[in-house]
Image (cartoon, grey):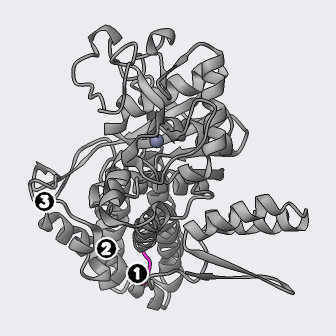
Amino acid sequence: MLRLYNTASREKEEFSPLELGRVRIYSCGPTVHDYAHIGNFRAFLLADLIKRYLRFSGFEVVHVMNITDIDDKILRRIGAGGKSLGEFTEHYSQIFFQDLHLLNILPADVYPRATAHIPEMVALIGRLLEQGLAYQREGSVYYSISRFPAYGRFARLDPSGMKEGISVDRDEYGKDDVRDFALWKAWVESDGEVGWAAPFGKGRPGWHLECSCMSMKYLGESFDIHTGGVDLIFPHHQNEIAQSEGATGKPFVRYWVHNEFVNINAEKMSKSQGNFYRLKDIGKTAEDIRAYRYLVVTSHHRTVLNFTLEALESSKAALRRLTQLRQRLQQAHGEGEAGLWKALAAAALAEFCAHMDDDLNTPRAIAAVFGLVNQTERALNQGHLGREGAGAVLECLERVDQVLGIFYEVVEEVARPAELPPELALLLRQRQEARQARDWKRSDELRDQLAGAGVVVKDTKEGYEWSWA
Ligand SMILES: [Zn+2]
C-alpha cells in the first residue's frame, strides 16, 4: 500500500484514489518564456516517477500538465523581440518537449495551454464573482481572500501576518487588500496586441487561475494528486485551492506532493550567480543525460538535491554497472540454482516496492536493487549463475526499470517532432469534427490556434494535411 507525504496534512497518508483503479494527476507545467533549467525538471521527473509507480502498481493514470503561455514575463519579452505571442511561446514549448523526451519522461495525456482556455477561465471568474469571492476594479478582477476563511491554512500561514513579502504588480490598481490576487488583469498599453474580450473588460487571465481552471476541466472538480515544486506551495497552490474550493464548494485535491529544490555545488541556482544550467549544459552526451535522470530519481524528492559533477559521475558509474550487468545476464548460459535465484530476485523486488510504498523512498529502493546486483555479480564471476537464474534477475531489473525509467536510448530529436504533440493533435481532431458539423466559425478558430502553435493545416479532398510552418 502506497503512502504519500501530503503537504496538506504534513503527514504520510495511505493513498487511495477517488475512483477505483484510476488516478487523476495534475502537474504545474512550465512557463514558456525561457529555457527550463535542470532544477525545473526535478518537478517533472517526480510526476513521472509517481505516474510510473502507480501504473506499475496496477492503476490507470490520467495526467494533465499545463503550459503557461501567457504571463507578465512573456509579455515583457515579446515586447522586446517583435515576435507574436504564439511564435514566441511555441519555440520554448518545443525545446521543453524535447528535453522531456531526452529525460525519458512519459508524455502527459493533455498539455492544455492557457491561451486556448480563455472562455473557461472567464466562466470560472464569473462563478467567483457570483459567490462574492471576487470583485472588479478598473477592468481587473481580484480574489478577495478575506471572504475565504480557510485562506492560509494549506500554506500554514496566518493571513493577518501575510502582508510582508507580497509583491504588488504595478498594474494591480485599487485592490481592497494588498493580499488579494488578480484573477483577470485589465489590458494596458504595453500589452500590445495581447488581450481577450471579457464581460469585465479586455485583459488576460492571472496565472493562478489557469491551473484551477484547466485541472478541473480535464480532471473534474475533485481529483487525486497535484504535483509541483515547494516554491509553489505559496501563493500559487494556496490560491488554486481558494479559487477551486471557493467556486465549487468541494475538496479540490486529495494529495499534494511537492519536490524540493536542486542546488548547484551547495548554492541556490540563479541567473545572477551564473550557475543556471539547462539540460544541454550538463548533458553533453547521452550518458550525461541518463545520469541526470538517474541522479534525480534515486534522490528523495523531499530532500534538497545538491548537484555536483562528482554526483553526476557517480550516477554514471552506477548506471554503467547496471547496464553491464544486464548485458552479462542476457548472455548467461548453463545450469545453476534457479530456484534460489528466483527467490532472491523476488525478495529484492519486494524490498524495492516496500521502500517505494514508503513515500517513494527511491534511495532505499535502489539500495535494495544493488543488494541483488552485488550477489549476482559475484555469482557470475564464479560461474554459478545459470541461464534460468540470470533470467530471474534480469526480470527483476526490467520491473525496476518500469518504475525508474533508467535503461533507455537517448535519441536527439530534430527541431520539429514528426508527430504532433497530443494537445495539438486534439485541436486538429476537433477542427475536423467542427468541419463535419459545418461549424465554420469554430473550425477557423481552431485553425488559428493551430497556426499560433506553428501548425499549418491544408484541407484536401481526402480530409486534411498538416505541416510545421
Ligand atoms: Zn500551477
Identity of the amino acid at label 1? Val
When the figure is inspected, residue 196 is found, relative to residue 389, above or below; the finding is: above
Asked if ligand 1 lies within 8 A of label 3, the reply is no
Determine the secondary structure under disc 1: loop
**N-terminal of the two: label 1 or label 2?**
2
| 206 sits left or right of 233 in the view | right
Quarter of the view holding residue 313 = bottom left
**N-terminal of the two: label 3 or label 1?**
3
Label 2 with label 3: CB-CB less than 8 Å = no
How packed mark 1 is, by other alpha carbons closer than 10 Å (few <14, some 14-19, many 20 or more), is some
Q: Which residue is found at the position 48% from the left and 43% from the top?
A: 357
Q: Magenta stretch?
A: 407-411
Identity of the amino acid at label 2? Ile
Foreground tag (3 vs 1): 3
Label 3 with label 1: CB-CB less than 8 Å = no
Q: Which residue is mark 3?
A: 275
Nearest to the observer: residue 286 or residue 156 = 156
How packed mark 3 is, by other alpha carbons closer than 10 Å (few <14, some 14-19, many 20 or more), is some
Q: Which residue is found at the position 37% from the left and 54% from the top?
A: 74
Foreground tag (2 vs 3): 3
How packed mark 2 is, by other alpha carbons closer than 10 Å (few <14, some 14-19, many 20 or more), is many
Residue 409, magenta (yes or no): yes
Q: Which residue is mark 1?
A: 410
Rendered location of residue 108, percent (x, y): 57, 59
| 85 sits left or right of 290 in the view | right
Rendered location of residue 112, percent (x, y): 58, 53
Quarter of the view holding residue 427 = bottom right
Placement of the C terminus among the 4 image quadrants: bottom right
Rendered location of residue 332, percent (x, y): 45, 89
Quote the CA–CA distance across marks 1 and 2: 8 Å
Q: Which mark is residue 289?
A: 2
